[in-house]
Image (cartoon, rainbow, N blue to C red):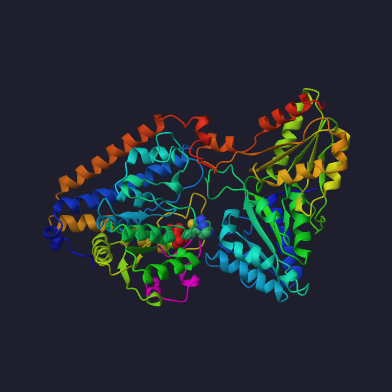
């Protein structure tokens, strides 16, 4: 059973619920656009799509303020959008353009938007966890009051950085939320074969912090559990580990034949556990939105992505002189 | 003779060695059904079984140490590190442990392990997946460092590396996996520390490594049309280094350009240039030995900038020409 919207209408308001739907749709259509541009040869290198995982990005970021921070991963387009980044400049970055968030130097795996509190995607699995702890330490030292949501995948929980970070955050009571998007696989490794425990959230107990499991296809549940962890963190009660059970619909990256998993399993997630579809139905059922509003949302998304693609395609390439700019040593 | 790719040559020799020696096995991330990030181990798991082809969690610190421990106690592990950038996470086990144990133990014990790992830029993977960090390894007494540039060399050097009783870091290149060349079916060994003259010439010696061997050969073709005869030497192994072949060539040509993809500053090309200067070839030099390496920048995402960050064929042509116009007093 999905979380009912009814309570939320009074709690957080219709507009924010509608916005969650808008953002999830924006992420999905963004990824579809990126995939198309990639196939057309307009994006080079590699990309990691988060289709299927939209509710985790949107639900978790909905619990944050503008001042709060996130650290993201190689599969970071959704986090970036959910944290409020400017989508045309994001698209420009993926096309390697001068107008991109990172002037075309970062690309898909390194999108960052410091003004919006996105401290950056990361090409290194588990690379973001210690950085999130550092940002949370700043918050404590400066009594700045912001919290940090640190996104990472199931595969990252087997890196030393994961364990060192959770321990450190726990002894220092850092205002950080470790948000594991357990999409069941690393690049190909099934997490069931890569750990002996049933739920990754159990790892929390080794560090004396709370561990929560959420349905990663239920945006409201993700929101609620994250909001609770955020509140704890703001109150000085330290970190929380949240494990969201989810699934990436697409391959790991552009060159993945998906031999390590069954087509039936994919179909099951896509047909029966689509977090966008269920949320839309829920909103309609609870009369939080009308059919007409849903159509309008789709239209707004479509327009923004057309604008973004046009902006990105028409943007200039970075100048060759910029190669050595921003290198200070 | 039949032609196969660089990746196929590596897979073939690994499979042959695993079948021939019960102590040999391979471990690494996604090397099972996925076939490794670059497809090198494609089909090995189904052919050789899961006890010879060990898919590991994403835990570079642990798996590199596992290779060390297994090697110290009688096995001959092959470790596939998915991208050579991740050696940063494996550094303790490789640098502080593998390289030194035998010496620290007063010569007792041996560490017969090969770390296979792809380096280099050109695939659009940006700053954290495109580095050429081999100079770090060459700086550590106790590590041998190999950089094959052709399918033939890859197979023969790999066999020698695996037969060696000491740790060998075996740098492959992402852009070379697909190149084809003649490779014998049976196993053969190319001794470590034996350079190869890839092209004979009389005016300038170009010492080039890995992908740069191919660019140097293309540059030599172009320069030939202008009446300039270039000798291209591929050291093939950086440690041990066959300096004699290089010195003899420079005595003949009186000029040398050292070309490498890694950041020029502090790169291994500087070592080669110094060795030439300190050798008997010094008296024969008609121009200073020059280096042509990568720019001191992280590898950018934008494809035009990415190309500019490391030497291309035109850059080699220009470097050779400038060395020819420099006359010794
Ligand atoms: C330190 C490190 N090791 C390996 C990789 C290669 N790699 C990139 S993504 C990935 C899988 C990550 O799995 P997970 O953390 O579950 O994230 P997901 O891709 O499922 O979102 C791997 C092995 C890397 N980028 N960094
Ligand atoms: Mg995963």
Q: Residue at x 14, y 53 (%)?
A: A14
Assess whether residue B215 is covered by the magenta stretch.
no
Q: Can I make out residue B207 in this image?
A: yes
User: Looking at the rendering, in which quadrant would you find the C terminus of chain B?
Assistant: top right
Q: Residue furthest top?
A: B226
Q: Could you say which is closer to the camera, residue A141 or residue A39?
A: A141
The quadrant in which residue B229 appears is top right
x and y percent of residue A309 in the render? 36, 36
Q: Residue at x 35, y 50 (%)?
A: A118
Left or right, A126 with reference to B257: left
The quadrant in which residue B84 appears is bottom right
Left or right, B184 with reference to B170: right
Q: Could you say which is closer to the camera, residue B53 or residue A45?
A: A45
x and y percent of residue B59 in the render? 54, 66
Q: Could you say which is closer to the camera, residue A304 or residue B141?
A: B141
Label tally = 0
Assess whether residue A185 is covered by the magenta stretch.
yes
Vertical position of residue B22 compared to residue A80: above or below: below
x and y percent of residue A44 in the render? 50, 41
The quadrant in which residue B298 appears is top right
Left or right, A109 with reference to A147: right
Left or right, A197 with reference to A12: right
Q: Can I make out residue A263 in this image?
A: no
x and y percent of residue A2 in the render? 23, 65
Q: Could you say which is closer to the camera, residue B246 or residue B184?
A: B246
- Give the magenta range: A183-204
């Amino acid at each position: 059973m999905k979380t009912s919207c009814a309570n939320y209408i009074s709690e957080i308001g219709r507009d924010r619920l509608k916005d969650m739907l808008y953002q999830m749709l924006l992420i999905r259509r963004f990824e579809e656009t990126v995939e198309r541009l990639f196939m057309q040869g307009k994006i080079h290198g590699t990309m990691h799509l988060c289709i299927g995982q939209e509710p985790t990005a949107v639900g978790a970021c909905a619990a944050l303020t503008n001042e709060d921070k996130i650290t993201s991963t190689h599969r970071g387009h959704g986090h970036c959008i959910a944290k409020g980044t400017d989508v045309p400049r994001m698209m420009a970055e993926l096309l390697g353009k001068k107008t991109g968030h990172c002037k075309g130097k970062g690309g898909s795996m390194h999108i960052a938007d410091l003004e919006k509190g996105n401290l950056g995607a990361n090409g290194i699995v588990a690379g973001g966890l210690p950085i999130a702890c550092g940002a949370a330490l700043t918050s404590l030292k400066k009594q700045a009051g912001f919290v940090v949501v640190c996104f990472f995948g199931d595969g990252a929980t087997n890196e030393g950085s994961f364990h060192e970070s959770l321990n450190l955050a726990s002894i220092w009571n850092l205002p950080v939320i470790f948000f594991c998007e357990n999409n069941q696989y690393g690049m190909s490794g099934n997490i069931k074969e890569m750990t002996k425990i049933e739920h990754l959230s159990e790892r929390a107990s080794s560090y004396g912090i709370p561990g929560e499991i959420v349905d990663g296809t239920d945006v409201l549940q993700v929101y609620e559990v994250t909001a609770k962890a955020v509140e704890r963190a703001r109150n000085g009660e330290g970190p929380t580990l949240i494990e969201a059970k989810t699934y990436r619909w697409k391959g790991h990256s552009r060159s993945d034949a998906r031999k390590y998993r069954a087509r039936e399993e994919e179909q099951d997630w896509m047909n029966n556990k689509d977090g966008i579809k269920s949320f839309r139905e829920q909103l309609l059922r609870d009369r939080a939105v009308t059919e007409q509003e849903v159509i309008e949302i789709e239209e707004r998304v479509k327009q923004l992505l057309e604008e973004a693609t046009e902006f990105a395609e028409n943007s200039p390439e970075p100048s060759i002189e910029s190669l050595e700019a921003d290198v200070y040593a | 003779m039949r032609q196969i790719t660089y990746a196929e040559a590596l897979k073939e020799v690994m499979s042959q060695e695993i079948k021939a020696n019960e102590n040999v096995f391979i471990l690494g991330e996604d090397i099972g059904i996925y076939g490794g990030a670059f497809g090198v181990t494609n089909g090995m798991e189904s052919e050789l079984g899961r006890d010879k082809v060990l898919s590991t969690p994403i835990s570079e610190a642990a798996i590199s140490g596992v290779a060390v421990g297994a090697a110290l106690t009688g096995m001959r592990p092959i470790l596939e590190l998915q991208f050579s950038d991740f050696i940063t996470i494996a550094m303790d086990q490789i640098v502080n442990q593998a390289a030194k144990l035998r010496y620290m133990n007063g010569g007792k014990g041996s560490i017969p392990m090969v770390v296979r790992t792809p380096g280099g830029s050109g695939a659009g993977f940006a700053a954290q997946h495109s580095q050429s960090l081999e100079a770090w390894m060459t700086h550590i007494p106790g590590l041998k460092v190999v950089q094959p540039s052709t399918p033939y060399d890859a197979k023969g050097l790999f066999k020698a590396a695996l037969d060696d009783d000491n740790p060998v870091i075996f740098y492959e290149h992402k852009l070379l996996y697909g190149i084809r060349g003649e490779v014998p079916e049976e196993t053969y060994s190319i001794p470590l520390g034996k350079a190869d003259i890839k092209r004979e010439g009389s005016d300038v010696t170009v010492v080039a490594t890995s992908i740069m061997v191919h660019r140097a050969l293309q540059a030599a073709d172009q320069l030939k049309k202008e009446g300039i005869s270039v000798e291209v030497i591929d050291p093939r192994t950086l440690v041990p280094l066959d300096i004699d072949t290089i010195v003899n060539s420079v005595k003949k040509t009186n000029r040398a350009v050292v070309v490498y993809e890694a950041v020029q500053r502090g790169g291994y090309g500087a070592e080669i240039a110094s060795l030439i200067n300190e050798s008997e070839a010094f008296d024969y030099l008609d121009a200073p030995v020059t280096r042509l390496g990568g720019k001191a920048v992280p590898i950018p995402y934008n494809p035009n900038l990415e190309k500019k960050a490391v030497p291309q064929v035109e850059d080699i042509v220009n470097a050779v020409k400038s060395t020819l116009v420099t006359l010794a007093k």
